[in-house]
Image (tube, rainbow, N blue to C red):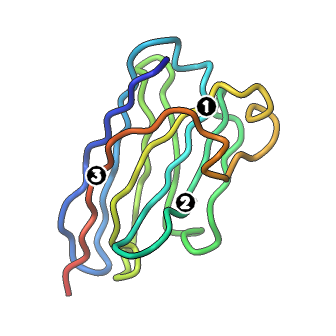
Amino acid sequence: QVLLVESGGGVEPAGGSLRLSCAASGRAFSNYAVGWFRQAPGEEREFVATINQSGSTTFLADSVKGRFTISRDNAANTAALQINNLKPEDAAVYFCAATDAERCSVYVCNQRANYQYWGQGTQVTVSS
């Protein structure tokens, strides 16, 4: 089992930047692919980005390509989501998720059902 804690959310104006962090504890972090999802009020939780166990493969949702970057540091047991050029539609609670599914080391895992472990989320607010 792995425990995930997100941080780094806050209030930023449109066009601003935030860096979200996901700290993991428990079993070896390098065994887990990591995904970021977000959920706005009244909306379904949606996929944002994923990175495989080794960090060699990343995949981002079309809506955030060119603005978001996902990364990880297995030695530090952390993953990060760099958000640049914030847009109002980026406002949501952002969740870090992890899975030890071997297939996610090779294939893109961009579905909620792929992930076994979830953090509590961190709020991102975009001020006008």
Where does residue 98 sit, x and y in percent of width and height?
Answer: 54, 34
Query: For the point 53% across and 12% down, which residue is it?
Result: 28
**Neighbour class for label 1 at 10 Å: few (<14), some, many (≥20)?**
many
Q: CA gap, disc 1 to disc 2? A: 15 Å
- In x, y percent, where is residue 93? 33, 60
* Amino acid residing under circle 3: Thr
The earlier-in-sequence mark between 1 and 2 is 2
Residue 7: horizontal and vertical position, in percent? 26, 43
Is residue 56 found left or right of 97 in the rendered image?
Answer: right
**Which residue in the rendered view is the most extreme toward the top?**
27
Name the one closer to the observer, 82 or 91.
91
Circle 2 sits in a helix, a strand or a loop, which is it? strand
- Residue that badge 2 annotates: 48
- Counting from the top left corner in percent of width and height, residue 43 is at 45, 74
The crowding category of the residue bearing disc 3, from other C-alpha atoms within 10 Å (few below 14, some 14 to 19, many at least 20), is: many
Is 2 left, or right, of 34 in this rendering? Answer: left
Q: Earlier in the sequence, mark 1 or mark 3?
A: 1
Residue annotated with mark 3? 122
Q: What residue is pinned by disc 1? A: 99
User: What residue is drawn where x is 81% and y is 35%?
Assistant: 106
- Are the residues tagged 1 and 3 within 8 Å (C-beta)? no
> Around disc 2, counting alpha carbons within 10 Å, would you say few (fewer than 14), some (14 to 19), or many (20 or more)?
many
The residue at the point 54 percent across, 64 percent down is 46
Kind of residue sitting beneath label 2 = Val
